[in-house]
Image (cartoon, rainbow, N blue to C red):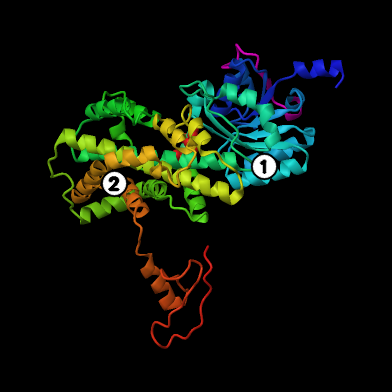
């Protein structure tokens, strides 16, 4: 590049951002605040999206150097090469449509970054497509909501490896910093791995929220604690091993009053929404043949919560006792604490096991310790125990399951009695706590050298000649029994999906 061209390039923007919804706006402001020259573009559609760019540049971005564009070609031309363009648009076809608009305007080596909650398979495809055209593509999970986008998010980029050195200074500068100062952003791996990791982050978020919800419900229904008492308890837990963003905001939510002075939480309809990443986590765990029961339970419970009329009808038919028992408050609150801690750990163990399996299956070479470190700040599931998780996965002998690491083995040993008591108590008192119970049962299955799957294999072979392996023969050798004396010797395939 000639000196003049170089100078011209240097005067252009360091990064472009497309999509001025709340996440996009806040990320642009965060970047500008870190000293990067930022260009922004939003499509202009008559009605809702008309004037979005002008409003932003004249409004929240007024005191910054952010340049606004309403024409995509002038936006692209405003960027220094290799261009870095972050797309903050709705996941799905809007990303593909935007890419089609951008491709003719790009030069070889330019980098597209998708910061939305895209499906990782879409990202796999987009990396391949972009690279086939000589461009680079980074699919990056961004967690932390509006606040994180503005003040520091957890950012999980993956895709075209050579793009990392180009985007690293910008992405790490706008990422949250963990307590030890490390940016909560590092390279995840190839293809759609960044979005896969974000998907599992969200799945864990679903489980955390369901588990916290169950803890709240137990205190409310079993112990008849009021919102202020429960807020105090969550606030105290937030100083202990359960220190985390979601526990912290739960205390704030419990205390929050509506305009009329009553608690807002008590007026919110108990029908939870979902945008799909929890469901995808479960679908992908199933595809990989991995148990992800706590997250699956959380997803199903959100669906179930929406069936409000059915639940009301069922409640009129079964008059369950639910609330008659009297329990020692302090002991039960302590047990709920331990059950929440244990169940959360179990859900993280399941989530990380899915990440490991995906890594092995897709050849991503994921670093689980680094992922745990990236989740320590900025993101919705940020919590103190991610430090311990990062340490456990950094051990020279990586544990086959998080719960089997030396540290967590001891932790689980300590909390198991309280965990069991809570599940037993709530079950006897007819209060639903599906995620706590699912977690405990996963732990029981994990620690069972034998499971009743021998019977399942026998049944499959009995009715469909699906064959079985024997304990007195090597693995991989399949047998069929003529169970009824008239079934014949023909075997069905012994393939597994
Ligand atoms: C985050 C959140 C974010 C968002 C989810 C909510 O990491 O910042 O996970 O991605 O809150 O999209 O998902 P649901 O609408 O499915 O609860």
* Disc nearer the start of the sequence (1/2): 1
Whether residue 103 is visible, yes or no, is yes
- Bin the neighbour count of mark 1 within 10 Å (Cα to Cα): few under 14, some 14-19, many 20 and up: few
Which disc, if any, is residue 433? 2
Q: In this view, does 39 lie above or below 351?
A: above
Q: Is residue 211 above or below residue 58?
A: below
> How far separated are the C-alphas under marks 1 and 2?
41 Å
Q: Is mark 2 on a helix, strand or loop?
A: loop
Q: Give the range drawn in magenta.
A: 59-74
Observer-nearest of 229 and 355: 355
Overall secondary structure of the magenta section: loop
Disc 1: which residue:
96
Observer-nearest of 402 and 4: 402
Q: In this view, does 151 lie above or below 254?
A: above
Q: Where is residue 224 in the image (x, y as percent from the top left)?
A: 18, 36
Q: Is mark 1 on a helix, strand or loop?
A: helix
Q: Where is residue 474 in the image (x, y as percent from the top left)?
A: 48, 68
Residue in view at x 22 percent, y 28 percent: 229
Residue at the far right in the pictured view: 2
Res 485 quadrant in image: bottom left
Q: Contact, CB < 8 Å: mark 1 with mark 2?
A: no
Residue in view at x 59 percent, y 24 percent: 172
Select label 1 or label 2 by which is in front. 2
Horizontal placement of 61 versus 315: left or right?
A: right
Q: Is residue 283 above or below residue 250?
A: below
Mark 1 residue's CB less than 8 Å from ligand 1: no
Which disc, if any, is residue 496? none
Residue in view at x 13 percent, y 44 percent: 325
Whether residue 224 is visible, yes or no, is no
Q: Quadrant of the N terminus?
A: top right
Is-magenta flag for residue 346? no
Res 53 quadrant in image: top right
């Amino acid at each position: 590049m000639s000196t003049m061209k170089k100078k011209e390039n240097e005067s252009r923007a360091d990064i472009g951002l497309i999509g001025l919804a709340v996440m996009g706006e806040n990320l642009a402001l965060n970047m500008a605040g870190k000293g990067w020259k930022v260009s922004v573009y939003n499509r202009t559609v008559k009605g809702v999206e008309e004037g979005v760019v002008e409003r932003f540049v004249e409004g929240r971005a007024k005191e910054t150097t952010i340049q606004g564009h309403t024409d995509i070609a002038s936006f692209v031309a405003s960027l220094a090469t290799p261009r870095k363009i972050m797309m903050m648009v709705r996941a799905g076809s809007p990303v593909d449509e935007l890419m089609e608009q951008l491709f003719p305007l790009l030069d070889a080596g330019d980098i597209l970054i998708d910061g939305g909650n895209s499906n990782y398979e879409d990202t796999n495809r987009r990396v391949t497509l972009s690279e086939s055209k000589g461009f680079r593509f980074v699919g990056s999970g961004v967690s932390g909501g509006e606040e994180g986008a503005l003040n520091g998010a957890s950012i999980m980029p993956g895709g075209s490896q050579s793009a990392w050195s180009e985007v690293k200074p910008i992405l790490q500068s706008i990422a949250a910093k963990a307590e030890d100062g490390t940016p909560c952003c590092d390279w995840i791996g190839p293809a759609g791995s960044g979005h896969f990791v974000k998907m599992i982050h969200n799945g864990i978020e679903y489980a955390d929220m369901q588990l916290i919800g169950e803890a709240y419900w137990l205190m409310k229904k079993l112990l008849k604690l009021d919102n202020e008492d429960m807020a105090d308890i969550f606030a105290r837990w937030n100083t202990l091993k359960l220190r985390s963003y979601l526990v912290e905001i739960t205390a704030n939510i419990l205390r929050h009053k509506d305009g009329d002075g009553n608690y807002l939480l008590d007026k919110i309809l108990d029908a939870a929404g979902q945008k799909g990443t929890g469901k995808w986590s479960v679908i992908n765990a199933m595809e990989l043949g991995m148990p992800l029961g706590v997250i699956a339970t959380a997803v199903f419970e959100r669906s179930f919560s929406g069936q409000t009329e059915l639940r009301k009808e069922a409640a009129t038919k079964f008059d369950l006792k639910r609330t008659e028992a009297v329990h020692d408050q302090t002991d039960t609150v302590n047990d709920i604490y331990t059950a929440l801690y244990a169940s959360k750990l179990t859900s993280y163990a399941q989530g990380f096991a899915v990440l490991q399996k995906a890594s092995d299956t897709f050849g991503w070479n994921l670093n689980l310790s680094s992922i745990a470190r990236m989740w320590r700040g900025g993101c919705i599931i940020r919590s103190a125990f991610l430090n311990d998780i990062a340490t456990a996965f950094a051990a020279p002998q990586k544990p086959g399951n998080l719960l089997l690491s030396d540290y967590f083995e001891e932790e689980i040993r300590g909390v198991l009695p309280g965990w069991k008591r809570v599940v037993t108590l709530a079950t006897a008192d007819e209060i639903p706590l599906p995620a706590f119970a699912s977690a405990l049962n996963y732990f029981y299955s994990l620690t069972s050298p034998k499971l009743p799957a021998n019977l399942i294999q026998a049944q499959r072979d009995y009715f469909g000649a699906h064959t079985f392996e024997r304990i007195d023969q090597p693995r991989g050798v399949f047998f069929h029994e003529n169970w009824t004396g008239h079934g014949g010797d023909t075997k069905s395939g012994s393939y597994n999906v």
